[in-house]
């Protein structure tokens, strides 16, 4: 039976599960709560990303609906996330909104291709130090960017990390202590509220209290705090629902935006699938990684047409959904509808929200993202993991997230290849070595006869996958050997598979030996490897009878060759 490439989890849940009134009420309650939780975050992420607050909300509404309706998980809540702040702000600064729209659409297409090609499983193999490295780096970067609004510094601040902090120290005298006090109070309120209630988020309380305090201070004390209205005066007339607008696309722009688009796609895939795996562990359910990638791709193609920014699964909002009783993707859809109603009826009051409250919310987001305990724990690991962790972390902070992810992916590939190669080795079997009864190659389980290796024959044992690095090891053994063997037997009973590079190198090895007059016999080749050799025509390169199922038969063939 051919497995379906794509099936939205919403469809499979409704088709295979009894969806009753009780389940619906649980989803509705969870969706409303998560929608309220998402409100301050969407606004804060929008502003921090260099776009407007309504663009952050539009992203949460449109992408939140699409990811729930078309994704591959039961519980995942989609929308703008803190991880995208750095990359979105960089794209907007360099290429403008048109560049962000085009790169997000391109990333959406890439995500769909990943899903169709069943690449979801690949992201499970990205080393944990790389994920922690760039996540912690993003957290530090978000924290850094919020210091301007947190302390009310009214000066131009560079976006690069080191120049940014140099500018902060140069403008210490320009700190607005009223803004700093407001930010500190909001931050303490967020932290303290967590001890009072887990249902209502502290970020929402800080947003409401900060806004009321800002209005009262302005009206009765003449103290003016910087607000969304002062930063975006055009919003004073309200926030109309945007109409979809197609971007102007040309090939030069597309070529320039390939790298940012890849970064958005990889970051979105990693974050959403990581969140999905966490929910699997908490709930005992299973997500469909490939369907989730396709759903994420659809969301990132449609959302920017409405002025939105890149979106992915948000782990904090997803956990809030689970903790508040969400059971199916309907909860994610209700969350999007809740935000839409807030957008339509309450957003005219958003102009009164102080930037200090949003800065405090984002500082708390940065702390929660930092994973400093995990970071500290990983520093006690092996040298390779620590090196990868620190490289990814500092690249994210000092260079940018795009470079960090690209280098991180390359490091993941290199580390994986290196570790697999370390699991493969070659040994030379000496005469009179006893056959192991545990060998898959042994014909008789009681067979423990000694190997009688005649003079002029060298037997090599390959353990693990046959990769490109092994061919050089054969040459090293030959160079150390004082005598030139007339027959080389390569035991492959413990070789589970070969890649094309390994086949090519084995072909070259056989031909080099043939030029020296040395025959090569393969022993204990399993059906999978033998099929690979046949596909590449390697069985034709070897002499007749030089692929044997057992070492004893290979030794008999070697004696025939010696006597010929």
Image (cartoon, helix red, strand yellow):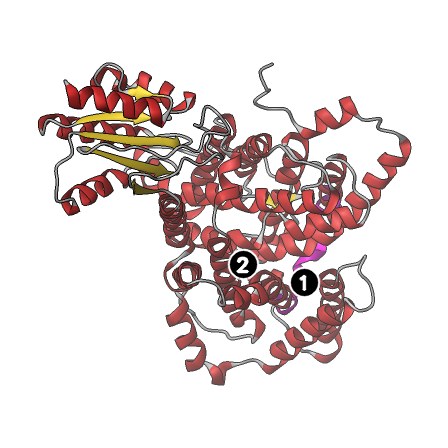
Determine crowd level at label 1: few under 14, some 14-19, many 20+ residues with C-alpha closer than 10 A.
many
Magenta-colored stretch includes residue 356: yes
Q: Residue lying farthest right?
A: 22
Q: Is residue 4 left or right of residue 221?
A: left
Which residue position holds label 1?
353
Determine crowd level at label 2: few under 14, some 14-19, many 20+ residues with C-alpha closer than 10 A.
many
Q: What's the CA distance linking mark 2 and mark 1?
A: 14 Å
**Which residue is more in the foreground, 438 or 403?**
438
Residue at 72% of width from left, 56% of height from top?
349
Report the disc number at residue 512.
Answer: none
Q: Is residue 370 visible?
A: yes
Q: Is residue 347 visible?
A: no
Which secondary structure type mostly characterizes the magenta part of the structure? helix
Mark 2 secondary-structure assignment: helix
Residue at 19% of width from left, 45% of height from top?
476
Residue at 78% of width from left, 68% of height from top?
193
Q: Is residue 437 left or right of residue 34?
A: left
Percent x, y of residue 206:
73, 66
Residue at 64% of width from left, 32% of height from top?
72
Q: Quadrant of residue 501?
A: top left
**Which residue is more in the foreground, 211 or 318?**
318
Residue range highlighted in magenta = 340-357
Mark 1 secondary-structure assignment: loop
Report the disc number at residue 48.
Answer: 2
Q: Nearer the viewer, mark 2 or mark 1?
A: 2
Percent x, y of residue 354:
65, 66
Do callouts 2 and 1 mark residues in contact (Cβ within 8 Å)? no
């Amino acid at each position: 039976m051919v497995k379906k490439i794509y099936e939205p989890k919403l469809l499979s849940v409704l088709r295979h599960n009894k969806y009753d009134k009780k389940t619906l009420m649980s989803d509705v309650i969870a969706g409303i709560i998560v929608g309220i939780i998402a409100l301050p975050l969407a606004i804060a992420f929008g502003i921090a990303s260099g776009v407007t607050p309504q663009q952050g909300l539009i992203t949460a509404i449109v992408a939140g609906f699409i990811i729930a309706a078309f994704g591959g998980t039961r519980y995942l809540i989609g929308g703008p996330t803190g991880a995208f702040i750095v990359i979105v702000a960089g794209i907007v600064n360099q290429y403008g909104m048109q560049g962000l729209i085009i790169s997000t659409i391109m990333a959406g297409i890439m995500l769909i291709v990943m899903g169709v090609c069943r690449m979801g499983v690949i992201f499970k193999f990205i080393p944990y130090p790389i994920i922690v490295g760039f996540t912690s780096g993003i957290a530090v970067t978000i924290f850094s960017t919020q210091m301007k609004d947190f302390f009310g510094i009214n000066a131009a601040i560079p976006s690069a990390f080191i120049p940014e902090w140099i500018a902060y120290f140069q403008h210490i005298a320009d700190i607005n202590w009223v803004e700093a006090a407001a930010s500190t109070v909001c931050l303490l309120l967020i932290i303290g509220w967590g001890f009072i209630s887990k249902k209502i988020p502290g970020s929402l309380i800080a947003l409401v209290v900060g806004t009321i305090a800002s209005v009262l201070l302005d009206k009765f004390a003449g103290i003016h705090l910087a607000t969304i209205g002062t930063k975006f005066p055009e919003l004073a007339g309200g926030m109309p629902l945007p109409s979809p607008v197609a971007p102007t696309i040309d090939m030069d722009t597309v070529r320039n935006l390939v790298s940012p688009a890849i970064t958005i796609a990889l970051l979105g895939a990693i974050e959403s699938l990581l969140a999905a795996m966490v929910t699997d562990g908490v709930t005992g359910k299973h997500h469909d990684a490939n369907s989730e990638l396709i759903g994420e791709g659809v969301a990132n193609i449609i959302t920017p047409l409405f002025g939105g920014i890149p979106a992915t699964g948000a782990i904090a909002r997803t956990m809030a959904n689970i903790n508040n009783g969400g059971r199916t993707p309907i909860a994610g859809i209700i969350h999007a509808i809740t935000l839409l109603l807030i957008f339509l009826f309450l957003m005219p009051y958003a102009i009164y929200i102080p930037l200090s409250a949003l800065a405090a919310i984002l500082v708390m987001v940065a702390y929660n993202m930092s994973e400093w305990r995990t970071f500290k724990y990983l520093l006690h690991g092996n040298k390779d993991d620590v090196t990868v962790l620190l490289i990814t972390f500092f690249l994210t902070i000092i260079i940018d997230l795009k470079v960090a992810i690209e280098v991180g992916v390359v490091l993941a590939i290199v580390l994986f290849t290196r570790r697999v190669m370390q699991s493969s080795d070659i040994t030379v079997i000496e005469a009179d070595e006893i056959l192991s009864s545990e060998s898959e190659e042994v014909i008789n389980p009681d067979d423990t006869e000694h190997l009688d290796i005649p003079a002029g024959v060298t037997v090599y044992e390959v353990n693990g996958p046959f990769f490109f690095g092994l061919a050089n090891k054969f040459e090293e053994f030959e160079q150390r050997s004082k005598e030139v063997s007339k027959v080389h037997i390569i035991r492959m009973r413990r070789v589970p598979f070969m890649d094309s590079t390994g086949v090519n190198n084995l072909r070259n090895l056989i031909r080099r030996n043939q030029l020296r007059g040395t025959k090569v016999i393969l022993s204990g080749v399993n059906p999978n490897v033998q099929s690979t050799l046949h596909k590449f025509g390697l069985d034709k390169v070897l002499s007749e009878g030089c692929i044997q199922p057992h070492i004893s038969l290979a030794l008999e063939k070697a004696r025939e060759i010696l006597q010929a």
